[in-house]
Amino acid sequence: MTDPLHAIVSGAGVGGLTAALCLARAGLRVTVLERAPALEEVGAGLQLSPNASSILRDLGLLDTLAPFAVAPEALRVRRARDGAELMRMPLGAQAEARWGAPHIVVHRADLQRVLLDACGSTPSIVVKTDVEALGFATVEQDGRPGVQIGALENCEHTRFDADVAIAADGLRSTLRGRLGLGLGDAPVYSGRTAWRALIPGSEAPARALRPETNLWLGAKAHLVHYPLRGSDLVNLVAIIEDPWRGEDAADIWRDPLDANPRHLHRAFSMWSHEARDLLSLVRQWRRWPLFERPFSKRWSMDNVALLGDAAHPVLPFLAQGAALAIEDAASLGLAFAAHGADARAAIAAYERERIPRASDVAIASRRQASIYHMTGPMALARDAVMRRISIEAAMSRMDWVYGYRHGSGVSRPLLPWRG
Ligand SMILES: Cc1cc2nc3c(=O)[nH]c(=O)nc-3n(C[C@H](O)[C@H](O)[C@H](O)COP(=O)(O)OP(=O)(O)OC[C@H]3O[C@@H](n4cnc5c(N)ncnc54)[C@H](O)[C@@H]3O)c2cc1C
């Protein structure tokens, strides 16, 4: 019997940990390398749509996550100026019946802890913190192709040998920089910043604690809020157009930028009292400049492949970044299960499925950005369409995103929200 393949996964974010679990299910031995000294409680809320929650369910993790998750009953779209409701798309039981799995919101730290605990109880997975992957070399090991990962472990240089390496090291992926994708392959600032905050439930107005996802649309700005951990917290994300030129934090999860909300309050000054009152409850804002990367037709070199934000950072307008990372992980696991020890064939199958899917979602997220931030007559026209749209039409526009399953090839519509 041959030894199982050994995979190194760099990065213990949502993508890396889910990939470790999926690869272990495919029979691989996995070592996860995480740069942070410890996986602490960092982050904010994440919406997890059925395309992702179905995978967590397949991994047996949805019930473990359930006590920390909220399943919003609806997505409520409102006009910034006066709070008028433009659209109400049911989620809850209707979403679960339509898309085959629940639509939930969770704190990223809760999801990461559930994934980490599952890795901890899987004998074929080892997670090592305080190890920063620096680069890789492809080699032959015992007659089969392999990878050496150069790393800093507790500040000492070291090396890890593996058959396969998965770079799940986020937007500023170090390993992606070694893939030879060209000088133009760098994160590009999108012209927008996200401002994230958590309000204690005890300080939030009762209407913000209803199990609903609220999306407010204003000129060149929008706001999303929903309750987290039952009603312990309210998660706020405000996205504005911002000619930001500063330095961004290398590790945005742990060192969010110092956020002076002056810009933010200016962008929201013409909004309804209800929205401004909610914003005024925030004690600490965290500012996240939003980046994209040029699309790449290749996510791999030899036995090294990209996954999650390292492969395809997407704008958060469809709330799909973490969901795509989870989809990537499932696809990777299934590709290795199908191709056995032939790592290159598995990676090629993974790229064939995932590059088109992630590109579709990235393009649609970009389009959604311009729809959400419309001004003047365009915004009036958008609002009129939203008010007229039937629930069936609103839900069917999300089928290709939320109803996606590995290999299902659900095609995407051309213009979401256009009636
Ligand atoms: C404002 C905002 C709202 C969002 N909302 C949603 C949402 O509602 N739903 C959704 O699905 N997505 C959402 N996203 C996107 C989502 O947060 C990301 O797409 C997702 O977290 C990416 O996961 P990842 O594991 O690929 O990368 P990351 O979460 O960035 O994890 C990368 C990990 O790699 C580690 N690392 C980095 N470099 C190295 C190295 N050299 N060696 C070892 N380790 C390393 C890092 O410390 C980190 O732990 C949102 C994003 C933003 C900005």
Image (cartoon, rainbow, N blue to C red):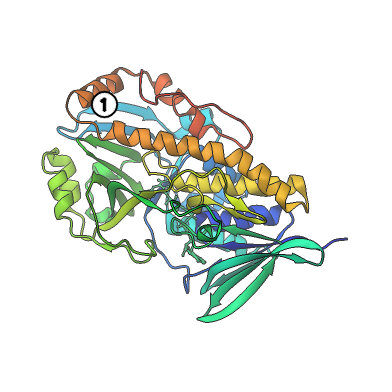
Asked whether residue 102 appears in the rendered view, the answer is no
Q: Amino acid at mark 1?
A: Leu
Q: Residue furthest bottom?
A: 156
Q: From the top left corner, tell me how far across and down residue 54 is, in percent.
A: 57, 41
Q: At 38% across and 59% down in the image, what residue appears?
A: 43
Q: Residue furthest right?
A: 1
Label 1, secondary structure: give it.
Answer: strand
Whether ligand 1 has any atom under 8 Å from the Cβ at mark 1 is answered as no
Q: At 29% across and 62% down in the image, what residue appears?
A: 247
Closer to us: 192 or 94: 192
Closer to us: 349 or 407: 349
Q: Specify whether 70 is left or right of 196.
A: right
The quarter of the picture where residue 417 lies is: top left
- In what quadrant of the picture does the N terminus appear? bottom right
Q: Quadrant of ligand 1?
A: bottom left
Q: From the top left corner, tell me how far across and down residue 296 is, in percent.
A: 51, 45
- In what quadrant of the picture does the C terminus appear? top left
Q: From the top left corner, tell me how far across and down residue 392 is, in percent.
A: 43, 20
Q: Specify whether 116 is left or right of 314.
A: right
Residue at mark 1:
86
